[in-house]
Image (tube, rainbow, N blue to C red):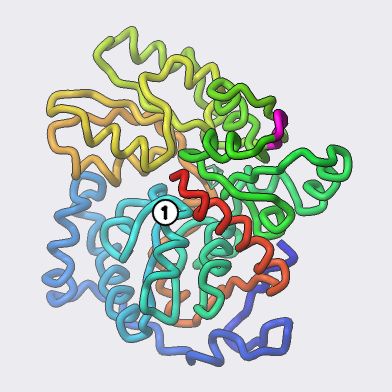
Amino acid sequence: MTNISVETPNSKASSGAPSAAERFGVVDMPSLEYTEEVARETAPLYEKVKHHIPEIEWPVHAPYVHAINKLKKERNAVILAHNYQTPEIFHCVADFAGDSLQLAQQAEKVDAEIIIQCGVHFMAETSKLLSPEKTVLIPDMKAGCSLAESITGEDVRLLREANPGVPIVTYVNTSADVKAESDICCTSSNAVRIVESFESDTVFLIPDEYLAQNVAKETSKKILTWKGHCEVHERFTAEELLAYKEADPAIQIIAHPECPTTVTEVADFTGSTSGMIDYAMSQKAGSKVLLVTECSMASNIESEAPGVEFIKPCNLCPHMKRITLPKILESLVYMRDEVTVDPVMAEKAKLAVERMVNLKTN
Ligand code: SF4
């Protein structure tokens, strides 16, 4: 976390450079009254979330949705939301949604000066790496990640010293500091192919122990790893999934490779968040799918798979849930919290991401 600086509206960045608030200015907090105009203009958005937000609660959310959508246009800002964000963020204020790499690549493409990253801080850092000229704000700097925080750049340096010549592949769910010390990054969908791109018989795949174990089952390489875990995916058990299957053998179990191998072994399909979405979308009407991942994702995609029943064993990510509509509005009003990455570290970390993208293994 040392490479990230938080700026309050009137502070300067630690480098002495003007803060985002000073560069872009602070505006007045918009009215949050639920007026007829707000009700009318947000009605089409409510249609998208009506199965998740009771009608009686909409007057609480709608003024924020209305104010955020208005202010993001005035600020020339773009809102990027991870698939695990709540439905009112995902469907009502996000300009783009996806997994962390897709969002960072989108940040690079968009013609906007300001990116509001609705996700956790390693995601905001990854967007900043790929778009150093843009201002990247995260609505809550405390939105961390058990997996990213399981390892530091210093740990990776020590691993390299102790294992000379062993390539180090790092999952994108890590800090810039960790990426900067790695040979290459990977995602959960390309990890096998990235590992196999090395001539070495032994490869480090860090920091997710379960992703590494799932990859090890699909390659002849010896995989060394780290004891990092995603606190959402590690909680699933084979027993609970088998109980669902016993109750209804037709249920398709779709798991994320951050789950333990005991879980992926009982799944009908294992894949990255985008792979899981594609698999769920390919099911026929009348099918039942159980997404073994953060449960907001099922809520976010079920409207796009009419007729498919989503069963949600509800594990929520407490870090993702730190991002809320009121905090997104505050980000836009006060231009906070800005994510910065040391330029030397950023250059090295970006190289690790670019090596992955250029390997054309996705
Ligand atoms: S779901 Fe897991 S990997 Fe994703 S941010 Fe939460 S703790 Fe980290």
Q: Residue at x 58, y 55 (%)?
A: 355
Q: Residue at x 67, y 83 (%)?
A: 13
304 lies left or right of 86: left
Quick one: quadrant of the N terminus?
bottom right
The relative height of residue 330 versus residue 11 in the rendered view (above or below) is above
Q: Residue at x 48, y 16 (%)?
A: 265
Q: Residue furthest front?
A: 199
At 22% from the left and 49% from the top, the residue drawn is 54
Foreground residue among 313 and 230: 230
Q: Is mark 1 within 8 Å of ligand 1?
A: yes
Is residue 147 toward the left or the right of residue 136 in the image? right
Choose between 299 and 273: the one closer to the eye. 273
Q: Quadrant of residue 228?
A: top right
Majority secondary structure of magenta residues: strand
Q: Is residue 139 magenta?
A: no
Disc 1 marks which amino acid?
Answer: His
Task: Name the residue carrying label 1.
Answer: 82
- Label 1 environment density (alpha carbons within 10 Å; few <14, some 14–19, many ≥20): many
Going by the image, does 169 lie left or right of 274? right
Residue 146 in sight here: no
Q: Is residue 203 magenta?
A: yes
The answer to whether residue 175 of the structure is visible from this angle is yes
Location of the C terminus (image quadrant)? top left
Residue 255 horizontal side relative to residue 214, left or right? left
Which residue is the extreme one toward the top? Answer: 246
Q: Magenta stretch?
A: 200-204
